[in-house]
Amino acid sequence: MIDMHKIIVVGGGGHGKVVISLLKKLAHFTVSGYVDLVDHGDLLGIPYLGDDSALGDFFKLGMVHAALGLGQLQEAGHREKLAAKMVEIGYKFPLLVSPHAIVNEACRLGDGTVVMDGAVVQTGTMVGNFSIINTCATVDHDCRIGDNVHIAPGATLCGCVQIDSCCLVGSGATIVQGIHVAAQCHIGAGAVVTKNIYKQGTYAGVPARPIGDKAP
Ligand SMILES: CC(C)(COP(=O)(O)OP(=O)(O)OC[C@H]1O[C@@H](n2cnc3c(N)ncnc32)[C@H](O)[C@@H]1OP(=O)(O)O)[C@@H](O)C(=O)NCCC(=O)NCCS
């Protein structure tokens, strides 16, 4: 029997909209609304509830489940801080896996993680909490992905890759087998990472190299 629970979505931008669409498709929850600093109007028929100052009140009204609808490129650390505050209030963040994704056996995925349409997570892979395995991303066997990691659409992690917490792996990027990427790195769209990355920073190109002002 389908268990219907109320759920609230945090963030009403592009990623929030995709999360709402996923929740509607899963039909395990009724989406009460979304919170955001900005009123984006109705999103796929889901109403705006205001900013996050009322999250404590919503919890008391029985909206005990929540989903993060914030992508990874927000103000640094905002996503993690907000999730931590909500966990402290008592919110539960279910793991959300699209029925059109494939998660094979012997994988473990944490609370608040979302796996979008067309994504493949191969056997033996572990993913932490609040991570995003986005549309058509491939995470092959025995990978280790930390908390708050965003594997963007179409990215490929070959087998035995380790991505530490709070990283973005850009759309279409490839991380070759056995590579370790340190926490808080941004890997550019289309990059190919062929060597371990030990320092926080932004890396892009083929093969991937440090770029920009924030280059290590
Ligand atoms: C790598 C990235 C994080 C860099 O962002 P940034 O720090 O704001 O960098 P900038 O846009 O200022 O670019 C700095 C330089 O790197 C180059 N560059 C940026 N992204 C690049 C990429 N993916 N590949 C190659 N070069 C890139 C820019 O052209 C620029 O070069 P220049 O100095 O010669 O003009 C970003 O461009 C990116 O690729 N993000 C991933 C986006 C994505 O996949 N989002 C998923 C949403 S669901």
Image: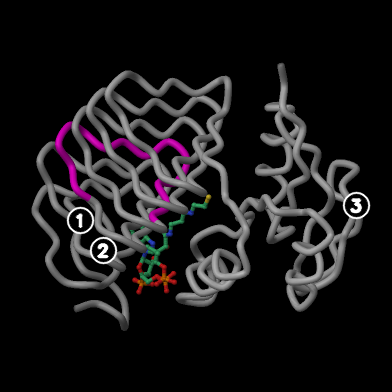
Distance of label 1 from label 3 (alpha carbons): 40 Å
Labelled pair 2, 1 in contact (Cβ < 8 Å): yes
Say which of marks 2 and 3 sits in front: 3
Estimate the spatial distance between the alpha carbons at disc 2 and disc 3, rounded to whole Å.
37 Å
Q: Name the secondary structure under disc 3.
A: loop
Kindly indicate the quadrant of the structure image that contains residue 123: top left
Above-or-below relation of 156 to 106: below
**Which quadrant of the figure shows ligand 1?**
bottom left
Q: Position of residue 34 (x, y in %)?
A: 79, 57
Q: Amino acid at mark 1?
A: Ala
Say which label, 2 or 3, has the lower sequence index: 3
Residue on which the image places disc 3: 42
User: Which residue is under mark 1?
Assistant: 208
Q: Position of residue 96 (x, y in %)?
A: 56, 37
**Of pointers 2 and 1, the one earlier in the residue sequence:** 2
Q: What range of the chain is rendered magenta?
A: 149-162
Q: Residues within 10 Å of mark 3 (few under 14, many from 20)?
A: few
